Amino acid sequence: MRVIIILFVIITAVWGCQPKPIDPAKAAPPYAIQLQKFDSAFFEMDTISLGKSLQGLMKNYPGFTEDFITKILMIKTVNDTQPIKAFYRAYLPVYKEVKKVNAMRTAMPIVKEGYTHLHYYFPNYPLTHNVLTFVGPFESYGNIVIKDAVAVGLQMHLGPSSNWYFSDHIQTIYPTYLSRNFTAQNIAINSVINIVNDIVPQLDTGTFITQIIETGKRQYILNACLPSLHDTVLLGYTKKQLNAVSQEESAIWDYIVDNKIVESKDLAVIGSMTREGLNNEVLGEVFPSNVGKFIGYKIVHTWMQQKEQKNLSMDALLKMPASKIQATVKYNP
């Protein structure tokens, strides 16, 4: 089925124009965050005396240096200086661009907003006060929850127009539909999502409906934690894609129901509505490939508006079985 959109000239920002809900965490005290710049410490090392410099790095960053070298750089030991020096030389130009872009200057106020809301909504979770920045291989991690910090790989936040993302090799890993979201704002989004998944890991098994509800729960919490960000940024959609799914929500849901996708466990069928891609090959090129994230969010949003969930906490929502939401939601777009 291809859903035809004919009202884009009239319908602009259908979703984004909806009023934001009341923010109960608005009056919460700001959550203190300390920025730890491991990237600067690493690339300011004296490579002539690299062994001594590494000892100093391990002293200043005892919990991260060894993991960075052995798990991110995939080097056997911190004493293997030759491959460490090779990475240093290869990525020094990337680090220089990281400094020029200075994504953390834009990201920090949004990260603080996210952490303040996370602490408000999940007061029993031992939320870190530290954000650690590093520069790693493009093929490696962009955001990791580590002991007492969230580690941010700034090589993944150089901006969508960065030349580093357009080499033939990197395009095979991160096509443009992915790298267009490699922004400073996504530092906060990825951090919040990873922390939420640290509280309750997301399972990628079950039926289509339970999987998108699990995604929808996290999207609902993300929206609540970062109310200053536009819905296109929070969902990772273009404005055109957001308008399309908003205007055609009912038709999309009808397609899912009519084609018996709701209870499907077929990975190919589920993937056709949930995987990242340039566009949705089933519904048409105007729709995002992972349209299931939007439908899952709308299901959870509908459920949370029902009177039975009037005083339900975010913690209870996150731990609520998707099957219970499916059984009791009055979703009828």
Image (tube, rainbow, N blue to C red):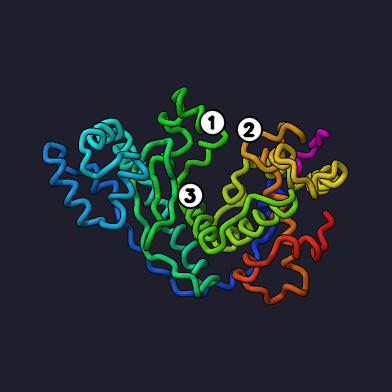
* Disc marking residue 175: 1
Disc 2 or 1, which lies upstream in sequence? Answer: 1
Residue stretch in magenta: 1-11
Q: Position of residue 194 (x, y in %)?
A: 50, 55
Q: Residue at x 29, y 37 (%)?
A: 96
Q: Position of residue 255 (x, y in %)?
A: 84, 42
Q: Would residue 4 be counted in the magenta stretch?
A: yes
* Disc marking residue 278: 2
Is the Cβ of the residue at disc 2 closer than 8 Å to that at disc 1?
A: yes
The residue to which callout 3 is attached is: 185
- Compare residues 64 and 165 and report the one nearer the observer: 64
Residue 201, above or below 184: below
Q: Would residue 216 be counted in the magenta stretch?
A: no
In the displayed orientation, state which residue is furthest to the bottom: 311
Q: Distance between the residues labelled 3 and 1?
A: 19 Å
Q: In this view, does 88 lie to the left or right of 163?
A: left
Q: Classify residue 76 by image quadrant.
A: top left
In the rendered structure, which amino acid carries the disc numbered 3?
Answer: Gln
